[in-house]
Image (cartoon, rainbow, N blue to C red):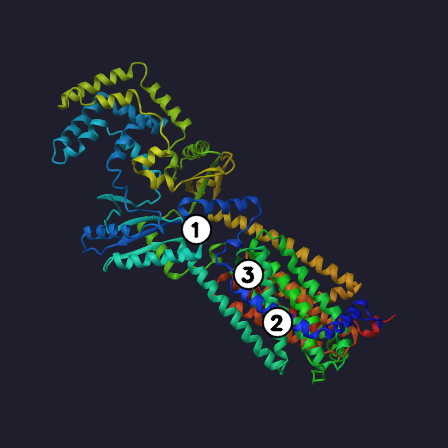
Amino acid sequence: MGTEQRHPVAGCGQRLHGWAERHRRAILWSVVGLMAAGAALVSRLPMREDIDTMLPRRPAGLAEDFRLLQKAPFSRRIVISIERPAELPVQDLLAATDALRAALGPPLFSRVASGPGEEAGLGWLFWLGTHVPYLAEEADYRQLEDSIAPDALRRTLDDAYRRLVSPEGLAMAKLVQGDPLDWRLLALRKLGQVNMIPNVRLEDGHFVTADRRHALILAETAIPVTDFRRGQALVEALDAAIREQVPAPLHATVLSAHRYSVANARAARRDLVVVLVGSTLGLAMLFLVFLRSWQGFFVFLIPLCGLLAAALGTALVFRPISAITLGFGAVLLGISVDFGLHVYFALRQGGDQAGRIMASLTRPLLLCGLTTMAAFGVLLGSALPGQQQLALFAMVGLATAMVLALGVLPLLIRPGRETALPWRPDGPRSRHRRLIGGLWAALLLGCALASTRLQVSGDLQALGVRPPEAIQSEARIEKTWGTIRGRTLLFSQGSDLEEALQRNDQVLALLNASGSADQAISLAAILPSRASQQERLDRWRAFWGSGRLERFRQDLGQAARQAGFAPAAFDRFLQTVAEPPPIYDIEALRAVGFADLVDAMVVIDAPGALVVSLAPSAAVEPLRGVLPEGVRPVSQALLQAGLSRAIRQDFTRFLVLALLLVGGLLLLVLRDVRLAAIAMVPVLSGILFMFGAMGVLGLSLNLFSLVAPILILGVGVDYGVFMLHHATAGDELPTRRAVLVSGLTTLVGFGVLVLAKHPALHAIGTAVVLGLVAALAAALLVVPVLAPRRTELQP
């Protein structure tokens, strides 16, 4: 860098400029045509507004957890709670519930239920009574044995007869005839283990609370939570139906994941406009203050062209492109404009020999571009598709800006000798070397100590927009109907439904053994596997063997006669005891009115089947080591812990790899360890200051701010390279002003992200601004102090 001989790259730069001058008209018209075509194509790019691209695809276990959560059937369920004031009759509440249920239908809503379903009638009660042989577990047989004792039979049948002769007895005749001993109550307790809404009761075929002040509607939709456009249509249709069908003083509260996704999408779109407009205006103001020439407009076009090329290049590989990635366009504007600024200031203040000036600039510009792209390039190996998009977006944009700055911009800037900010490297550096060096070392030491307080967060809820009204609705519904928070989802997977159900049975057995089954929600309570049903049927037949069935037949007949029943009143019941109905499947449950229940906990797709159970996280934790193969526990705590580990590992890996790549490039070009280390001073200063400031301010490193150190590395090394080149090469180019304005433009690009409402963009902006301030200060103040004098580099 500091030798007298012209480097081969400098000669290439001068020849490139000469060739461009000879083809000036063709080059400029080609650029104009490509810009117009690029703008038209970018305006039609499909965008993805959700955070799915920021969910990890590695490690495999963590990616599998997110995949399972997205497949959970109840993730698309919408809960609507309608409340009435105390003075309003309950009939008005139920009428409004029916009206709203009728208003919600295809194509937005695939199924809507406000109760067990009129088509089920009392059939499900009869069904439960006749299928006790398949539902009773070993612990239930003591109750069965007690219920068939002669004294218990007499008491039960006497009570049944009194109910039959009461005014409402006619409706109960078939129920008593089919289940005179109320064995269905045992099955009803099993049904309670499948109830995902703790406080629900039944009132005239409707889901209500015990105080009858609230009614419940459960709606399902095929629209994925990540589909913003159809999700927005669903939310708007639901709100319109509520306004029409739920009149005051009734009040409807809605809990839906679609509301959160729509809020996130709207925030991302709003931020995209605010960020791009804000950064554009900020850059324009800086250009007016520092460039003070209409020719500065051409510098401004460089990052815009880079932005168009970056969007198109990324969309060719990743489709649709993430709105969060496009929001990064403001940052790219601030970074890629640096190349144009260096060319502009050098041409306007370096004399009238454009070829000589470009020869001097080509080498540091290429080095800066390559090191910055190398820093971003490590993110191509990220487990997050969003970070891969961001890496490609930055690399394409930076490469485009660098090519335009070297090849096209010199054709538009008239060389001259405008007044520059004079800066003599040997002046202030000599007088303040110890003071600046000491303050810098002390600051880095303090930042290193403060960075030990930096935390890594895997909390996904903190990464999305959570509207206050949606949070209030969630709290209100949980207070009214109960909550399933603090539970772990247990996904039992199988090649078919039978295998998944067998594993689900084993899960419930483990919870039973640990004493936590009464707090669990498991379909195994009413839909055991065929293998489990066969075992229970064998146990049932063994129970009634050895003459017990015949004794029971005689005892029941005697108790029935004494109670006043006809001799053959319970023949059908006895036949069911002796010969239970066939083993049943999921379709049998759907047929008797349990379709909503089973479909909320079962997924059957091409790869196999999935059955979901829920249990308290505290109960699942001791069982994690003994869960059957194919059963995977997923909870918010487990996800956060896994995500935090993944972030920590990625952060270390990416930062080390980026430092090695950038450091290797510097050594390869500069061929001097000392010079390479000095060029890295802004990088180390920025990263350490960012970590220290985040630790002091209580900010965490998350999925989005993880990219901040890479950004600091890519930008900081540019500042270091140019300031080192200026100090050692001895040229008269206005490098200090170019670095200062470059830093300010980058700060503007990142600064507007701090104003973003979406936590993703805000997290990146806050973290990077902290590091950029330190990197820029270190480049302007510390690098000149540490850089060797030009005479020290000469042989």
* Residue 781 in which image quadrant: bottom right
| Residue 441 seen in the current view | no
* Residue 353 in which image quadrant: bottom right
**Closest to the observer: 316 or 52?**
316
Where is residue 684? Give x, y as percent.
67, 64
Q: Amino acid at mark 3?
A: Thr
Q: Which residue is mark 2?
A: 32
Query: What SS does tag 2 mark?
Result: helix
Residue 415 in the image: above or below residue 522: below
> What residue occupies the far top of the structure in this picture?
547
Where is residue 422? Give x, y as percent.
72, 82
Q: Amino acid at mark 2?
A: Val
Q: Residues within 10 Å of mark 2 (few under 14, many from 20)?
A: few
Instruction: Indicate the quadrant containing the N terminus: top left, top right, bottom left or bottom right.
Output: bottom right
Instruction: Indicate the quadrant containing the C terminus: top left, top right, bottom left or bottom right.
Output: bottom right
Distance CA(mark 1)–CA(mark 2): 41 Å
Distance CA(mark 2)–CA(mark 3): 25 Å
Residue displayed at 40% across by 33% down: 512
Position of 328 compared to 354: left or right?
left
Q: Disc 2 or disc 3, which is closer to the eye?
A: 2
Q: Which mark is residue 325?
A: 3
- Mark nearer the N terminus (2 vs 3): 2
Distance CA(mark 1)–CA(mark 3): 21 Å
Where is residue 465? Give x, y as percent.
45, 60
Position of 700 compared to 429: left or right?
left
* Residue 20 in which image quadrant: bottom right
Q: Which residue is mark 1?
A: 224
Q: Mark 2 and 3 residues: CB-CB less than 8 Å, in contact?
A: no
| Residue 460 seen in the current view | yes
Q: Amino acid at mark 1?
A: Pro
**Closest to the observer: 240 or 160?**
240
